[in-house]
Amino acid sequence: EAQVTQNPRYLITVTGKKLTVTCSQNMNHEYMSWYRQDPGLGLRQIYYSMNVEVTDKGDVPEGYKVSRKEKRNFPLILESPSPNQTSLYFCASSLDSNYGYTFGSGTRLTVV
Amino acid sequence: AQSVTQLDSQVPVFEEAPVELRCNYSSSVSVYLFWYVQYPNQGLQLLLKYLSGSTLVESINGFEAEFNKSQTSFHLRKPSVHISDTAEYFCAVRPLGAAGNKLTFGGGTRVLVKP
């Protein structure tokens, strides 16, 4: 089944403790992206990648890192999480710019 | 840069009544347009999209949206809603071509279908 898989689905952590949210897609898509969803703000792009080793900042990149060493994986790293990073995170992938994105099921992160 | 405005944050509607969700966008370049649906506790699913051609696009579950270039709108409609249509709906745009890495979303419209 074609899909985008994120792990974990839920995560509660403490301020300052490094964490990684994994994302993997099995559709050989070139584009991958991370979004965060907050009430009333819709979804905002954190980082995106247009291919292996090609990444760039989205609208809200502060406090996040990404890497794209393989085409299928695009992990999101929070080196020192803070409470304002409590949010619902979505990973998404797309074949190219002429298509919509396919989204993962989301990761609900709480930073206390 | 692009921006998307969904004019209604919540829309309560009775079952079998029609519903319209409004979406307006602004962009300095040509864009593709999308509607996504998010059911409770789930990820986003593509509902329908406008890339080119006929300005009226339809989904398999009875929704339709019309692209109006002069009004920069992409409103979503359904003539008769079901309880199962209760969800949050997001309008989004994506620029054409090489700059098309980013999907810009509106703030979402929460539809609550009442029996």
Image (spheres, coloured by chain):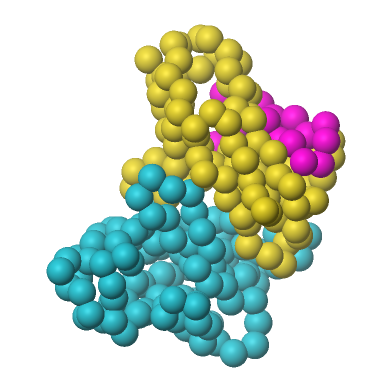
Chain colours: A yellow, B cyan
In this picture, residue A28 sits left or right of residue A59 = right
Q: Which residues are magenta?
A: A55-75
Question: Image point 41% across, 70% down: which residue?
Answer: B23
The answer to whether residue B75 shows anywhere in this view is no
Say how many tags the image has: 0
Residue A46 at x, y percent in the picture: 59, 38
Question: Image point 38% across, 45% down: which residue?
Answer: B41
Front residue (pair B41, B101): B41
Q: Quadrant of residue B55?
A: bottom right
Question: With respect to residue A10, does B47 lie above or below?
Answer: below
The answer to whether residue B95 shows anywhere in this view is yes
Q: Quadrant of residue A59?
A: top right
Question: With respect to residue A26, does B27 lie above or below?
Answer: below
Quadrant of image for the C terminus of chain A = top left
In this picture, residue A110 sits left or right of residue A74 = left
In this picture, residue B31 sits left or right of residue B98 = left
Question: Image point 42% across, 55% down: which residue?
Answer: B38
Question: Image point 74% across, 47% down: which residue?
Answer: A26
Residue A106 at x, y percent in the picture: 50, 40
Residue A46 lies within the magenta run: no
Residue A88 at x, y percent in the picture: 45, 37
The kind of secondary structure the magenta stretch mainly shows is loop
Residue B76 at x, y percent in the picture: 40, 76
